[in-house]
Every structure is written in structure tokens, then in C-alpha cells.
């Protein structure tokens, strides 16, 4: 005699079998299948009596406490731009000063020596490309990169730590000098986004560099509020993306533009 399969018994228990009448007759005739079917019904009945426990407001805390010991300990590494010593900071400041100086004198020389070339009958006038532009782009990109790193450090500054106050003030003074040169070049062009961003950055750097009594937890918190209110970090990142796009594509900005 063929016995019922497990799938047929489960379908019969839930009333989903395709041949319920035939299965029922088999159970009446086969004692072995009838006993197995009775065991199955008892198991299903026990499962129906299981009620999931309710979750109160502290359920998440209990789960976290149960698995905390099995999780690895994560220690966030604090990366500070002055961690490699004063020598690296002086090297960056010297390099930036040289680049800014080269850009300034190159711009002055070009303004004094550029002469328009009249077109001849056999040669069409070729568009002039400023020799100052590659230097200005490199200097501006370097300045915006340093400014972005400074603003990120200011945004995440630890107000309980006094070790960063003096290095941040010195960096702000160095950036302020470079920003004044970039503002002077931007004033000669029709680029309101660049002018506005450099003005906001200049105001923030001036406050950080000339804070009476130096930087402390209160002054750093005030600078953070000023940075968030004016959106200085967002403006600097937008300008950096513009500089990177123009420099990578080798394009020349439109007439009147700065970057």
C-alpha cells in the first residue's frame, strides 16, 4: 500500500489538498498514516499556541545590550592637519606664498607687455590666450583646497580641546593673506559667485585670525555659526569643482570670467 506523503498530510491539515476525499479514505484504511497525521496535527496545534512577545520602548536597548560584547570596538582616528609638526605647516605656507607671488607678478607683467596683433590679409586674427590663466587657476585651486580643509577642521573642532586653537589661528592668518590676493584678481572680472564666496571667506578668516585673546571654545563656536549661516564651506566646494572641471578639460573661461 502506498502511504501519504508529507506534503499531502500538510495540505489535508490546512484544508488545501487537491484530493481531500481520497486522503481522508486512505487515513481511515491506513493505521500508520493515521498516526503520522495525528502527530502532525498535534505539532501544528502547539505552534498555534505560541504568541510572540510584545515589544516595549526598551526593546532596542535590550537587543543592543545582548550583542554589544560580540561587536569589535571602533575607535575613530582623529586626523589633524598640523599632526606632522610645524615644519609641514611652514612648507605649505611658503609654497602658497611663492605661488601667489608668481601669479601676481605674472599678471602685472602681462598687463604691461601685451600688445594686440593686427590681422593681415592672408592670416585671420587668432584668439589671444592669457599666459596668466594657468598660474591663476593653480593658485586659486591650491587656495580653495587649503581653505576647504581649514573649514572642515573648524566645523568638526573639539571645543573642549585647546591644542588646536593656536595652529588654527596661524593657518587662518596665512589663508587670509592669500585670500586678499585672490580677491584683488577677482575684482577685475565679472564673476559674482567667486566675489561673494571670497568675501564670505575673507570675513570668516579675518575673525579667526584677529580674535582678541586668541581662539577658544566660545570664539570657535561663534565662527562655526558664522560659517553655517553664510554657507562658506558649500561655496568653497562649488568653486573647487568649477576650477577642477575647467583645469581638467583644458577649457578657457568666457570673457569676463575668472575661473
Image (cartoon, helix red, strand yellow):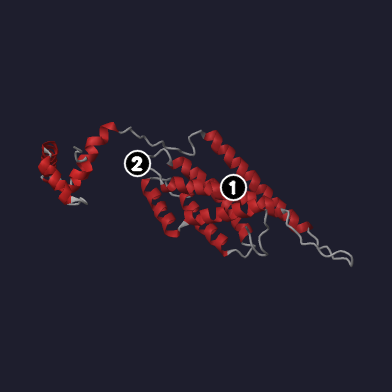
Q: Quadrant of the C terminus?
A: bottom right
Q: Is residue 82 above or below residue 18?
A: above
Query: Looking at the image, can residue 11 be seen?
Result: yes
Number of other residues with Cα within 10 Å of mark 2, as a class: few under 14, some 14 to 19, many 20 or more: few
Position of 141 with respect to 234 (left or right) is right
Q: Is residue 165 left or right of residue 88?
A: left
Q: Earlier in the sequence, mark 1 or mark 2?
A: 1
Residue furthest bottom in the image = 121
At a point 67% along the width and 53% down the height, the residue shown is: 250
Q: Residues within 10 Å of mark 1 (few under 14, many from 20)?
A: some
* Whether residue 56 is visible: no
**Which residue lies at the image location 56% right of the left edge and 53% below the top edge?**
240
Viewer-proximal residue among 113 and 43:
43
Instruction: Give the quadrant of the N terminus.
Output: top left
125 and 190: which is toward the camera: 125
Q: How many marks?
A: 2
Q: Position of residue 40 (x, y in %)?
A: 14, 40
Q: Position of residue 85 (x, y in %)?
A: 51, 33
Percent x, y of residue 120 = 88, 66
Judge depth for marks 1 and 2 and give the one in front. Answer: 1
Residue 5 as seen in the image, left or right of residue 188: left
Q: Quadrant of residue 91?
A: top right
Label 1 element class = helix
Q: Which label is found at residue 160?
A: 2
Residue at the spot of label 1: 142
Say which of 2 and 141 sits in front: 2
- Side of 11 where 254 appears, left or right: right
Using the image as rendered, state which of residue 236 and residue 42 is in the foreground.
42
Amino acid at each position: 500500500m502506498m502511504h501519504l506523503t508529507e506534503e499531502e498530510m500538510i495540505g489535508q491539515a490546512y484544508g488545501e489538498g487537491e484530493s481531500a476525499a481520497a486522503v481522508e479514505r486512505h487515513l481511515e484504511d491506513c493505521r500508520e498514516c493515521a498516526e503520522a497525521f495525528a502527530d502532525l496535527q498535534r505539532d501544528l496545534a502547539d505552534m498555534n499556541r505560541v504568541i510572540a512577545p510584545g515589544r516595549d520602548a526598551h526593546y532596542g536597548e535590550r537587543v543592543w545590550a545582548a550583542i554589544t560584547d560580540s561587536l569589535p570596538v571602533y575607535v575613530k582616528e582623529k586626523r589633524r592637519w598640523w599632526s606632522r609638526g610645524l615644519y609641514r605647516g611652514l612648507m605649505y605656507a611658503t609654497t602658497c606664498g611663492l605661488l601667489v607671488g608668481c601669479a601676481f607678478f605674472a599678471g602685472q607683467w602681462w598687463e604691461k607687455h601685451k600688445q594686440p596683433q593686427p590681422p593681415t590679409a592672408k592670416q585671420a586674427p587668432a584668439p589671444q590666450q592669457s599666459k596668466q590663466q594657468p598660474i591663476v587657476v593653480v593658485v586659486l585651486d591650491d587656495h580653495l583646497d587649503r581653505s576647504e580643509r581649514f573649514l572642515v577642521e573648524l566645523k568638526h573642532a573639539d571645543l573642549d580641546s585647546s591644542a588646536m586653537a593656536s595652529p588654527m589661528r596661524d593657518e587662518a592668518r596665512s589663508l587670509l593673506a592669500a585670500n586678499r590676493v585672490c580677491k584683488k584678481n577677482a575684482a577685475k572680472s565679472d564673476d559674482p559667485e567667486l566675489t561673494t564666496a571670497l568675501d564670505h571667506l575673507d570675513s570668516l578668516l579675518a575673525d579667526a585670525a584677529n580674535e582678541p585673546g586668541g581662539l577658544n571654545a566660545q570664539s570657535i563656536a561663534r565662527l562655526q555659526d558664522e560659517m553655517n549661516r553664510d554657507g562658506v564651506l558649500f561655496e568653497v566646494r562649488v568653486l573647487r569643482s568649477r576650477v577642477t572641471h575647467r583645469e581638467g578639460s583644458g577649457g578657457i573661461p568666457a570673457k569676463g570670467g575668472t575661473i
